[in-house]
Image (cartoon, grey):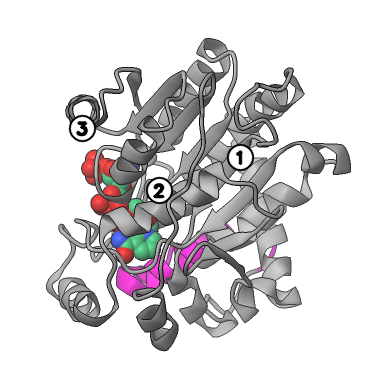
Amino acid sequence: MSFQLFKDARVNVPEAKADLTGRTVIITGSNAGLGFQSALSVARMQPARLILAVRTVGKGEEAAKKIQEATGFSRCEVWSLDMLREESVKAFADKANVDLDRLDIALLNAGIVMSQYELSPSGNTTQLQVNTYSTILLAKLLLPKVLTTARLPKLATHADFKPHISIVGSFVHFDVSRASLPKDLAEGSIVKALNRKSDTGMGGYNITKALLFLLTDELLAQLSPAERDMITINTSDPGFCVTDFFGTSGFLLRLYYSLGATLLSRTPQTGARLLTWAATQPTSQGAFIAGGCVERNPSKFVTSDEGKAIGQSLYRELTAEWKQKLLL
Ligand SMILES: NC(=O)c1ccc[n+]([C@@H]2O[C@H](COP(=O)([O-])OP(=O)(O)OC[C@H]3O[C@@H](n4cnc5c(N)ncnc54)[C@H](OP(=O)(O)O)[C@@H]3O)[C@@H](O)[C@H]2O)c1
């Protein structure tokens, strides 16, 4: 994978062009890093509403101010969303379903890497909770609004654009194979099995992204053929970007990061160009956008029958748990 990253770090990433007049966009984790840079790009496209979904409202307000200073765009709204807590995800989605008359783009970007073993209030490792489960829960909860938007009369600008749910994955999922996961993944106890202590740090982070691809495929598989025609769900990889992503992690992760940064990295602006492109341009249904905004195959594991079967079981298990908790 490193050679691909080396090549990707040097490839031209085109700037997305779109007039988003009249449209509503949500970007999670948009106070910093790639989410913030994506919000800057989207602001230049003049949407009717740009919702900065952030875990610390003060940081979001600061970001909104910076966006206004840089672009003149004054329609950022700062909404609270803590992806560590499922009830915050539910409250955010409930607000979106009530307050928004349309939702054209949900760019689900928020993510973390953790070097310590920590559990979320639901008992999952924090990185699985934030990167994987809460991202899919949020996508599921926003889906009805995105489908409703697709049924509205077409807007005059960017007319052929289908509403998008665009999920930020990572090249690191290529490092995950069946052997990276616990041996025993029996239906009904997969969530529990995945909360292993050994899966902190980079290895565990890679797993969160591989599972995110598998669960996104499942989300897509739940749509009817007519619904699949109306909207686009895709995934993206911004490449290795210099952000604060490894800022609070341990020494080894920061070492990995600084080694990678020397040879393989892109600026956050370049990485965000890719995320913005995936979120605002027409792509194939289920596409994985990477490199210079091209459609690529995800890893062999993610596309294998074995991987898909794990994705299906995990999706069933999570959905049952969320229904039981009245989150769905
Ligand atoms: N940087 C890379 O090389 C790279 C490569 C591939 C993929 N990615 C992916 O790109 C995405 C953005 O990463 P980045 O590099 O921009 O990292 P970043 O600078 O650390 O930004 C991460 C964003 O996610 C937010 N976030 C973290 N935990 C959250 C929670 N519990 N609830 C809501 N928001 C939360 C952060 O908010 P706070 O500021 O409050 O912490 C921040 O806004 C992640 O999904 C990451 O996995 C990054």
Q: Residues within 10 Å of mark 1 (few under 14, many from 20)?
A: many
- Nearest to the eye among marks 2 and 3: give it: 3
> Which numbered disc covers residue 130?
2
102 above or below 181? above
Q: CA distance from mark 2 to mark 3?
A: 29 Å
Query: Amino acid type of disc 1?
Result: His
Which element carries disc 3, helix, strand or loop?
A: helix
Which element carries disc 1, helix, strand or loop?
A: strand
- Residue under circle 3? 70
- Residue under circle 1? 164
Does residue 248 appear left or right of residue 312 in this picture?
Answer: left
Q: CA distance from mark 1 to mark 3?
A: 26 Å
Q: CA distance from mark 2 to mark 1?
A: 20 Å
Question: What residue is rendered at 44% in x and 82% in y?
Answer: 4
Image position, residue 25 (x, y; %):
48, 29
Does residue 262 appear left or right of residue 232 in this picture?
Answer: left
Q: Is residue 203 shown in magenta? A: yes
Of mark 2 and mark 3, the one earlier in the sequence is 3
* Residue 188 in sight here: no
Considering depth in this image, is 56 or 284 the residue closer to the camera?
A: 284
